[in-house]
Amino acid sequence: MVDALVFHVLLLLGLLGLCMLLYELWPWLQAKVGQAHRQPARQAKRCAKARKPFAGLTHKPLCDACQHATEPRQQAPFALPPPLTYTRGRRRTIDMQQHFCPDQDCSYYGWVGRGNIRANGHPGGRPWRQLQCVACHTSFQETHGTPLHGKRVPAEFLVRVIACLAEGLGIRGTARVFEVDPNTVLHWLVEVADHAAAFSQYCLHDLRVTQVQLDERFALLSAVKAWEVSDVEAIQRLSRSPHWVWGAIDPVIRLLLALDVGDRTLEMAQRLVHQVVQVLAPDGVPLFLTDGFREYTTAWVAHFGQWVQPPRRQATGPAPKPRWMPLPRLHYAQVVKQYRRRRLVGVRHRVVFGTLAGVTRVLATQGWQINTAFIERVNLTIPFGQKTQPHHFRRAYGPAMPARLRPHQRWACAMPSCLSKQKIVQPCGQHVDQGLQGSAHRS
């Protein structure tokens, strides 16, 4: 009993001594901790250096999209054919001004509104009219050049199927809902994607914009390797693989210029920039705003660059080699975000090409600052994510299909809107591949 009492007394005295020691050393410890916190700030300030100007490149950056670019779009012939008017017979009541002759040997090929197309009834009691060119006597259906051509199902049925795919329902799920074969749904998806690409190419070209925002966002897509599986195996193998959704928008008029899917690499950055350049006017160089992804710099220099001969530094010796430099009128700024433990802790702006005054002058017309808020909002609002997770792609936008369909994934958003009876003019766009026609097969 006595030993326990002595032990407790000694323990109490030790605790009192420890408290007095901490009381005496507390100011000294607080000073040391404050000095340690101030030290990194001084180091960061000492390490901060002025950003060096772009020194140029000794070779022009290569862009695979530019090397494998398709042939330029065919233009309508310059010889305008005379309009055809008819004064005899019954007055025409069906408007055929938006159709053209599909025969390339016809002098009216590619021209609309010339009066050479007339309606020729409904052969076989079918819902679509048969049209005829009075110049070459070529007959064709009203749906020629559209995804509705050659289909044995009602147009409303095909529109509902494509709308389900665009809203996120998978190929097999859509096939079960509408009781059709999955291969038929896949073929319809191919045709509509091709038509949507042609529709976008026909409508978006020679745009004059003042600024463009680009951004990429992580998503989950279903895809398979290139040309290694058939159509049936592609539907069955819905393997998940990480991809990024790339987008570009004109924030002034809220126009989506490009949308693509791929990894976060230099190749994808160049492909997105290439798509943006294709829809811009040839002499247009707007202000470009992106995040801090470094590969954008090489992509912009590849498409908006020129060879510049540096001045001599000395009177004798060989002349310096030419440098590939960005165009003087190119303005490009980045929004660099700093994260710590997956949380945003800071945002800073960086002008890569051009001057801060030039960037500010472009943004001052709208009263804005350097930001990528519009394209980031588009990434969250475009319906390619699930309702609970808008940052994930739905399977309809990345279906398991061969790689020949992969370039058309970005056109999935425009699928329902492109199913119109009006076909794309051949000299200015592309026709749908008539070899990929499907019909409803009961499963």
Image: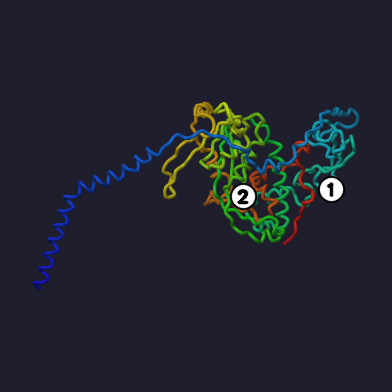
Q: Position of residue 120 (x, y in %)?
A: 86, 40
Please, is residue 430 above or below residue 219 in the view? above
Q: Which residue is mark 2?
A: 167
Residue 314 in view of the camera: yes
Residue placed farthest to the left in the image? 2
Q: Quick one: SS at disc 2?
A: loop
Q: Position of residue 258 (x, y in %)?
A: 62, 40
User: Where is 282 relative to 441, above or below?
Assistant: above
Kind of residue indicated by mark 1? Gly
Q: Quadrant of residue 197?
A: top right
Q: Is residue 95 left or right of residue 276?
A: right
Q: For the point 85% across and 29% down, which residue is it?
A: 81
Residue at x 61% of width, y 29% of height: 309
Residue count near mark 2 (Cα–Cα under 10 Å), binned few <14, some 14–19, many ≥20: some
Residue 266 appears left or right of 370: right
Instruction: From the image, tell me which residue sits under label 1.
Output: 125
Residue placed furthest toward the front = 316
Mark 2 or 1: in front is 2
Q: Position of residue 420 (x, y in %)?
A: 72, 42
Amino acid at circle 2: Glu
* On screen, residue 54 above or below 130: above
Secondary structure at numbered mark 1:
helix
Q: CA distance from mark 2 to mark 1?
A: 34 Å
Name the quarter where the N terminus is drawn.
bottom left
